[in-house]
Amino acid sequence: MNRQKKLKQLFKEKAKKASAKLAPKKPKYISKAERAKMEAEGLVVADSGESAES
């Protein structure tokens, strides 16, 4: 491979990795403690939301 082709290939790889980071396929990781906290808050919000609608 010549020098220009190598540089072009490296640039393509870096660009591909950068775009993959911007649009991840997996959802963002949420720790177990955060999930429990969100669930507790969600139950409180859901309960208050139901009583407000009734």
Image: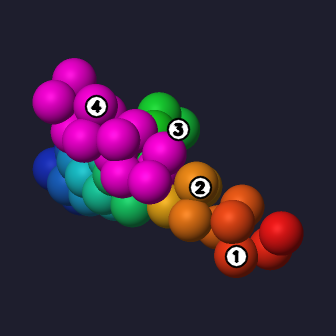
Residue denoted by label 1? 52
Measured in 3D between alpha carbons, the distance from the residue under mark 3 to the one under mark 1, in whole angstroms, is 37 Å
Q: Is the residue marked by circle 4 packed among few (<14), some (14-19), or many (20+) residues within 10 Å?
A: few
Q: Quadrant of residue 13?
A: top left
Q: Is residue 34 magenta?
A: yes
Which mark, residue 11? none
Seen at 52% across and 38% down, the residue is 25
Camera-nearest label, 1 or 2: 1
Which mark, residue 46? 2
Q: Is residue 3 visible?
A: yes
Q: Are marks 4 and 2 in contact (CB under 8 Å)?
A: no
Give the residue furthest to the top. Answer: 32
Can you say which quadrant of the picture contains the N terminus?
top left
Residue denoted by label 3? 25
Q: Quadrant of residue 40?
A: top left
Looking at numbered disc 4 in the image, what kind of residue is underneath it?
Answer: Ala
Above or below 21: residue 28? above
Seen at 25% across and 52% down, the residue is 14
N-term mark: 4 or 1: 4
Stretch of the chain drawn in magenta: 30-44
- Looking at the rendered structure, the number of numbered marks drawn on it comes to 4
Looking at numbered disc 1 in the image, what kind of residue is underneath it?
Answer: Ala
Callout 3: SS: loop
- In the image, residue 9 lies at what x, y percent? 32, 46
Camera-nearest label, 4 or 1: 1
Residue denoted by label 4? 36
Callout 2: SS: helix
Looking at numbered disc 2 in the image, what kind of residue is underneath it?
Answer: Ala
Above or below 16: residue 26? above
